[in-house]
Amino acid sequence: MSSAAARSPAATVESAPLRPPRALIWIVGIAILLTYFGPIGSMTLQEPDEVRYAEIPREMLESGDWVTPRLNYVKYFEKPPLLYWLTAINFRCFGISEFVARLWPVWFAIAGIVMISVVGRAMFGGWVGAAAAAILAATPYYFGLGQFLTLDMPLSALLTLALGSFWFAYTSTAARHREAWVLACYAATALAVLTKGPVAVVLTGGIIILFLLLQWNLGALRWLLSPLGILLFLAIALPWFVLVTLRNPEFLRFFVVDQHFTRYLNPNEHKETFLFFVPIICGGMLPWTAFWFCAPDLMKRFGQQLWRRRLSAATLYCLVWSGTVFLFFSSSGSKLGTYVLPMVGPLAILAGRFFERLIADGRADVLRRGCIATVILGVGIIVGGAVTARLLHDWPADIIVPLLYIGGGMLALNALAALACVRRGMLQASFVVLLLGVLAVQAVAISGRRAGVTYRPLGLAIAAEARADDQIVSYRHYVQAIPFYAHRRVVHVRGHGELEFGRQQGDQRAYFWDSDEPLVNAWASPRRMFLVINRSDLEPLRPRLQPAPREIAAADRKVVVVNF
């Protein structure tokens, strides 16, 4: 393909010799829905993120204030409110439960899968679109984050909708259709801003502008910078920021300066190296990344085409999309493993294109090596289970080890079945077998989150015994599950953590104690108290607590003790 053709939008759809059977698409689609929705109600909400993002909507419903987010009844401005609103609506319609709390992340995950399918189809044909969607759904990193109540999956899905809409606008030949897609891009970006803030504009704008620069097509900015699109963006994103600022003048400095610029440039937590995300992406996209490593000749040819700028516009767009996300978050001083989720979608499209070429070109050698690597991976997981069993003899090993044996065994057997298909010349069947197997392994593996930290038993124990005027106190550490499961405000002794900003807004002295003295005095009073405390902190404090503490519940390192 010439460089001129590579820069032409009309040259973005490449013929695909393979056609996915419709019945097979239905089978894989149903498997995706079952594995994504099936597990979400079976586990308690995990500390700290899931319970935090469930408690804020619960307090919205309780207070009736949908403008000012609150956590443990104090102002909490670290994130915008879109996910809070959606979750609160679910709570109001369906009741408060773990299943209901996690519904929106799963719906956003499905929306991302559908959009990647549509974009992949437009870029490279129907087979690649279907394969890209299936690969994305069967990517453990993507699946796992779709099972948890956090902001990362909503942000990723909305960025996918925005960037996918831009691609359709870029390749559209009809002005009317182009304008509609541009408006969709602005609307999705605005919703992403309401999900996680200005980072959505930085990523969407950065990816699009870099792509246009590499395409030598900055003239596209004439239709991209749509006045109607900008008005739509402002109409969606701006009202909440105006309202919350009018009601809370302290909001802008904390949200914009402290939570975005300072956290990106000079953070005081989550500091990692520049290459922190490399193993996360390579490992989180297994077994699909293993196949790339098993095709060094194809990867070398791809690198040469990239160097010589002989890639199609579609391939270049996927690379710019994923690469910009990676470089932006790798350059940040603060890193969490969930941040680069938005780069997985375009990588899934490239993976779908890769497998299409393998199957169409009859590259059984690469598929064979990839299946063998996946067998080795499964065996390695089993060995890891055995090592874990030798090193750990208590919880959570009782949960993790059996899952490692089962998951590793399933993956190895599945890869052997795919390998058998390859040896019989059934290359497309081997790909499908591997997909269905990985979906099944994911559904089994996600139950391992039972080994995560949860303090639901403590919250429920308090809820069962507490009276309206009883006092709930947490010592040194804020336990997110207590206010959510107990439906009560918690007093904090010494450890304020992420509530520090809220503590400074108004007179909060009755609920934030900076020393042990208020605790000791309140404990000795006639008022009943439930104290959530680490066992290690309780022992040195016990002699000062009179009457003697009585334990009513325990979970992990924490206990609930009472003074009655």
Image: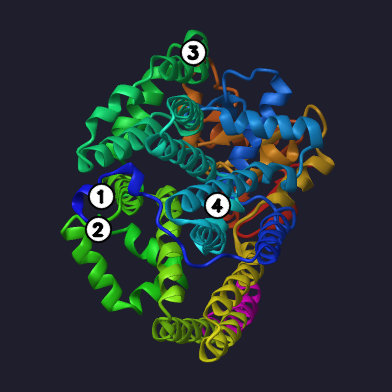
Residue of label 2: 1
| Dot in front, 4 or 1 | 1
**Residue on which disc 1 sits:** 5
Cα separation between marks 3 and 2: 57 Å
Q: Which residue is mark 4?
A: 537
Tell me which label, 3 or 4, sits earlier in the chain. 3
Specify whether residue 548 is in view: no
x 48%, y 44%: residue: 156
Q: Nearer the viewer, residue 241 or 512?
A: 241
Give the CA distance from mark 4 to mark 2.
68 Å
The structure residue drawn at horizontal position 43% and vertical position 81%, both measured from the top left corner, is 362
Image quarter where the N terminus lies is bottom left
Residue tagged 3:
248
The percent coordinates of residue 138 (x first, y second) are 56, 64
Tell me where residue 411 appears, x and y as whole percent.
57, 80
Queried whether the magenta region covers residue 144, the answer comes back as no
Q: Residue at x 66, y 56 (%)?
A: 36
Q: Which secondary structure type mostly characterizes the magenta part of the structure? A: helix
Residue nearest the observer in this picture, 464 or 146: 146
Q: Amino acid at mark 1?
A: Ala
Please, what is the three-letter code of the amino acid marked with disc 3? Asn
Q: Which residues are magenta?
A: 388-409
Q: CA distance from mark 3 to mark 4?
A: 37 Å
Question: What amino acid is found at the position of numbered circle 2 in the picture?
Answer: Met
Please say whether residue 89 is visible from this viewpoint. Answer: yes
- Residue 333 lies left or right of residue 48; in this view the side is left
Q: Earlier in the sequence, mark 4 or mark 1?
A: 1
